[in-house]
Amino acid sequence: MGFETCGPNEAMVVAGCGHSRPLMVPGGRIWVWPVIQQLQRISLNTMTLQIHSKEVNTSKGVPISCIGIAQVKIQGQNQDMLANACMQFLGKTEQEIHNIALETLEGHQRAIMGNMTVEEIYQDRKKFAKQVFEVASSDLIQMGITVVSYTLKDITDNEGYLAALGKTRTAQVHRDAKIGEAESRRDAGIKEAIANQERLKVRYENDTEIAKAKRDYELKKAAYDIEVEAKRAESELAYDLQAAISKQAIKEAEMQIRVEERAKQIQVQDQEILRREKELTAQVKKPAEAEKYRLETIAEAERNKVILEAEAAAEAVRVKGEAEAFAIEAKATAEAEQMVKKADAWKEYQEAAMVDMVLATLPKVAAEVAAPLSNAKKVTMVTSGKGDVGAAKLTGEVLDVVAKLPLMVENLTGINISKAMKIKK
């Protein structure tokens, strides 16, 4: 059994036999049984943290760097916070605890910087420090660590933004000082003029002549003052006008630069469009035109082939027609010559014999006249509405041809068949 003590900047944690949960003793003494009990110590010293946050973008995108100084310590007087600290850091060195607290505070400091503008951080450091303190305290208290204090030590930037703010404020102060000085001079001049007027008024009441002279003098002086003030006003107006002209010229130059930049961008876009058009022409249009020409050439060849085949067929039909016409003509000539020879022969016969031959031939002639009709697949009859149509019309046509045969025989032979038939009877 041993007796252990610790100072006010340290806490002892005893665990083991005899304790249902670890016993925490901040700054005191306790009996510890060796082997069956374990003693651990945790530091309660205040730790100074120097928090560097470099190149953090604020709410408006301006990067700045901040250095904050924080004092933190493990809370030993509150048993719940001490228990949390023991669960988090027991067995760790003071440097390790220092690093954990530093990283936590640095994260909160960066987060608050990102939610504020440079002007808010620069002009109201107390507000920034208060926000970091409150946010970090609510987080670290869960670890058993208390934030004793936090101060924003320094703000810097690499873009010259803070220097520009200082110059702007200095210019405002100088401007206000000049305005105040001018107003003071104006008020002094007004008061002095009023005092002189009162003084002169008293004197002019005592001496009319002097008053007249003074009146003339004051009138001339007033005229001169008006002229001087007019020149001064013109000068101030010319200064303001020149300043406005200069600002306008600067704006016009900036606008011209933007126009030129836009024109360059348009030129680049036009060049890109031309490049794409050439690329599309090479990859799509030219192959398409070649394919079109190939198809047109094939189509033209097919068309010429069809035309040549049609012309050849037409020529064959024409030659065939001419041959058939020549054959018909030759046949007709031969038949005519044969008929003439037959007519000459028939003159030597008696009329009765010739009549018998004609009558024997008439059925064959009728058959030959009707033969084309029997071979026809389709017969189209056109009528005016007067007379027979259909089979009656065709039969009538055949009979008319047969009825004209005697006249034809008489014209060829000089024999009237009708009379010969009657004589025969």
Image (spheres, grey):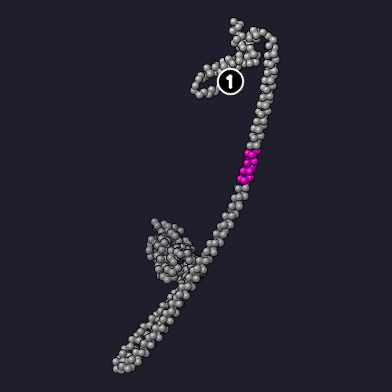
Question: Residue drawn 42% across and 84% down?
Answer: 228
Name the residue at 57% across, 55% down.
273
Residue 424 location, quadrant:
top right
In this orientation, does residue 82 appear? no
Q: Which residue is mark 1?
A: 376
Q: In front here: 195 or 202? A: 202
Q: Secondary structure at mark 1?
A: loop
| Magenta-span inclusion, residue 71 | no
Q: Is residue 36 above or below residue 72?
A: above
Q: State left or right for residue 397 relative to residue 69.
A: right
Q: Quadrant of residue 2?
A: bottom left
From the viewer's side, name the closer residue of 166 and 42.
Answer: 166
Whether residue 211 sits left or right of residue 241 in the image: it is left
Please state the extent of the stretch shown in magenta in the rendering: 287-301
Q: Residue 363 at what x, y percent from top left? A: 61, 12
In the foreground, 2 or 248: 248
Is residue 67 found left or right of 274 in the rendered image?
left
